[in-house]
Amino acid sequence: GAVVSQHPSRVICKSGTSVKIECRSLDFQATTMFWYRQFPKQSLMLMATSNEGSKATYEQGVEKDKFLINHASLTLSTLTVTSAHPEDSSFYICSAWGDRGTYEQYFGPGTRLTVT
Amino acid sequence: GENVGLHLPTLSVQEGDNSIINCAYSNSASDYFIWYKQESGKGPQFIIDIRSNMDKRQGQRVTVLLNKTVKHLSLQIAATQPGDSAVYFCAENTAYSGAGSYQLTFGKGTKLSVIP
């Protein structure tokens, strides 16, 4: 299967600071990357979809100015949580899709963000 | 499916027994369904998928059944092992994301606990 990595795996930051999370497809070109957020004991909720070279499309209720997404290359997308607050503490997961002849998305291992 | 509530449904099974995890999906137009396994602190792991032109698909120790009439999906795990303990999510492809990919909508999830 295809491999997707995320960095960092865990991050703790202070309220008001910004945090960048990277998502990389290691062995395929990801035309589309998705960002999800997961709160404890809940399901994955799609935050945004980004196609390489285009602006991200955000789901309803997700602030695009707070969650900045950049997908500048076919192997890297970044999510920056700006002016983080404790309520932004969550598990952030990316997935990647590339032209491999399948609908399957390949998921990263997730990033645990804690805002103090 | 909807993501409501803070308590995941739980299924407890004895090691060696078969497990059946159910999922109701929401979109009758969805044509691709996937089951994921998620261990604590990790990203979702692909288990098996099925397209809407099929009603059954088998993998290694797992079987997925699709009933489009009632919009129901099930995952059967044969001879359940302690390593199968995790949260299981069904997902359906919903909206077209552009560039050939589709967004996924995740179900609520079921926590499977295997009793040794």
Image (tube, coloured by chain):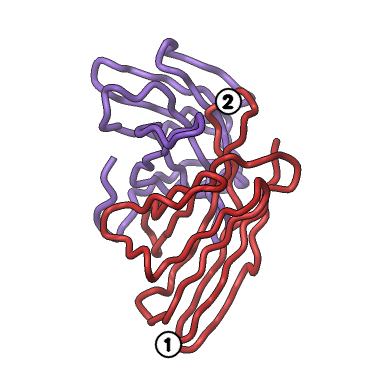
Chain colours: A red, B purple
Question: What is the three-letter code of the residue carrying label 2?
Answer: Thr
Question: What is the three-letter code of the residue carrying label 1?
Answer: Gly
The disc at residue A102 is 2
Q: Quadrant of residue B33?
A: top left
Q: Secondary structure at mark 1?
A: loop
Residue visible at 68% across and 40% down in the picture: A29
Residue visible at 42% across and 59% down in the picture: A38
Query: Share a chain, discs 1 and 2?
Result: yes
> Where's residue A68, x and y in %?
46, 65
Residue visible at 48% across and 64% down in the picture: A91
Q: Secondary structure at mark 2?
A: loop
> Where's residue A37, x and y in %?
42, 59
Residue visible at 39% across and 74% down in the picture: A88
In the displayed structure image, the side of residue B36 where residue A64 appears, left or right: left
> Mark 1 and 2 residues: CB-CB less than 8 Å, in contact?
no
Q: Is residue B41 above or below residue A87?
A: above
Q: Is residue B94 above or below residue A5?
A: above
> Where's residue B60, x and y in %?
64, 25
Callout 1: residue from which chain? A
What is the spatial separation of the Cα atoms under label 1 and label 2, in whole angstroms? 41 Å
Q: In front: A20, or A74? A: A74
The disc at residue B107 is none
Q: In front: B47, or B94? A: B94
> Where's residue B6, x and y in %?
29, 61
**Res B115 seen here:** no
Callout 2: residue from which chain? A
Residue at image mark 1: A16
Question: Which numbered disc, 1 or 2, marks the residue that appears first in the sequence?
Answer: 1
In the displayed structure image, the side of residue A10 where residue B32 appears, left or right: left
